[in-house]
Image (spheres, rainbow, N blue to C red):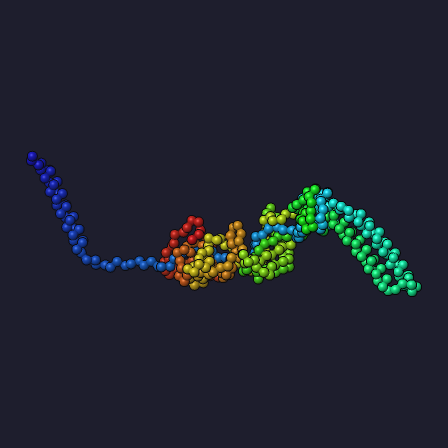
Amino acid sequence: MRLQRGHCLALAATVILSIWMASGKMNKAAQPHSVAVVANPQSDIFSVQVTRFHAQTVTPELVIHGQTAPNRRVDLSSELTGRVIRIHRREGDFVEKGQLIMEIDPQDKPHRLLMAQAQLKQRTLEHKANQNLIKKGLQNETRLAHSDALLAAAKAQVKLLQVQLAATKVRAPFAGVLEDRKVEVGTFLKSGNGIISLLDFDPFIIKGYAAEKDLLRLKTGTQARGRTLDGQEHLGVIRYIASQASAASRTFAIELQIDNPSGRHSDGATADLIVPMAATAAIFISPALLGLDEHGTIGAKYVDQHQQVVFAPVVMVKAESKGVWVAGLPNPVDLIVVGQSFVSPGERVHPVFSEPAPDNREPAQQNSRSRQLPVASHGGK
């Protein structure tokens, strides 16, 4: 097949163009650089976002978990042998001091008391007669001494029976609430058997256990607050701190005494002791700004006046729902709020304030170009 003249011209032009382009690339590859490339060095200074914080005076609080307790508790027991014949007050009842709670069968004690009283009257008359005879010289001292002994024995017998008869009526030794009754009508008691418990809730007590590290910060007579399970808080005074630690937990018992005009009573309910500590200067921050160093010490990173990163250990002073109060940082302090995970203590940085830079800080040097870090959207590390 013969090519047309047009086709031949087109083919020849294509070949010539391809040879020309190939020769140009070869010459470019072989040609040495006539001008050196100037590097645009990037600075190693990172940019971090900082916020200035100022310390405030706060009163930290020591919270000790505990439980409610009565001011005092006594387990009433039987002083004699006998059967319960009447119960005047039930569990949960409030009784005043001296109020009758229950009665035990007195058996023959009332009759024996009458006999003892009659005998006492007789011994009293005999003793007076002997005294008159002594005055007249008609009686000797031995007879009078015997009369004295008989009179004393009669008095003792009357007193014993009066005590036993009174013991048949069980009365409240102080005002309180009755709990844990162990007897019913018809129960036969022996001397020493338990009857019922009496709890005094005025004042109201919250008991807890303080750790060894907190013991030196506690003192009897200190005002504190008690928080009960219903969320109510009551002002009270620390009345007791144990001198001996619990062998099991190495903690020390502590008691908070609270006035109880409302007469509320509960034993063993969950409650907290809130003890105020000495006021201190602290900064309120988000827990997200805290971190650990290589030794596991909790602290925060900030930028000093030389634009260097510093890691400072902090002490937790007080915790709240929206943040924590910490001490141990300079006042004021420019905390790194974004980028703290990308810089190390001693490293020079370019601080970018979340608000306009304070007047009392030297502006960051601008003679070198800083490299901006990625910014976390949550504002943490």
Q: Residue at x 79, y 49 (%)?
A: 112
**In the image, residue 135 lies at what x, y percent?**
91, 64
User: Which corner quadrant of the image does residue 221 belong to?
Assistant: bottom right
The residue nearer to you, when weighing 233 against 208, is 208
Q: Is residue 11 above or below residue 329?
A: above
**In the image, residue 359 lies at what x, y percent?**
48, 60
Q: Where's the N terminus, which quadrant?
A: top left
User: Which corner quadrant of the image does residue 57 belong to?
Assistant: bottom right
Q: Residue at x 50, y 59 (%)?
A: 315
- Can residue 59 be seen in this snapshot? no
User: Which corner quadrant of the image does residue 318 belong to?
Assistant: bottom right
* Residue lying at the far right of the rendered structure: 136
- Can residue 191 be seen in this snapshot? yes
Q: Residue at x 38, y 54 (%)?
A: 373
**In the image, residue 375 lies at what x, y percent?**
40, 51
347 displayed left or right of 276:
left
Q: Residue at x 40, y 59 (%)?
A: 344
The residue nearer to you, when weighing 145 against 289, is 145
The residue nearer to you, when weighing 305 against 72, is 72
**In the image, residue 348 lies at what x, y percent?**
40, 61
Q: Is residue 65 above or below residue 9?
A: below
The residue nearer to you, when weighing 257 against 182, is 182
41 displayed left or right of 288:
left
* Residue lying at the far left of the rendered structure: 2
Total numbered labels placed on residues in the image: 0
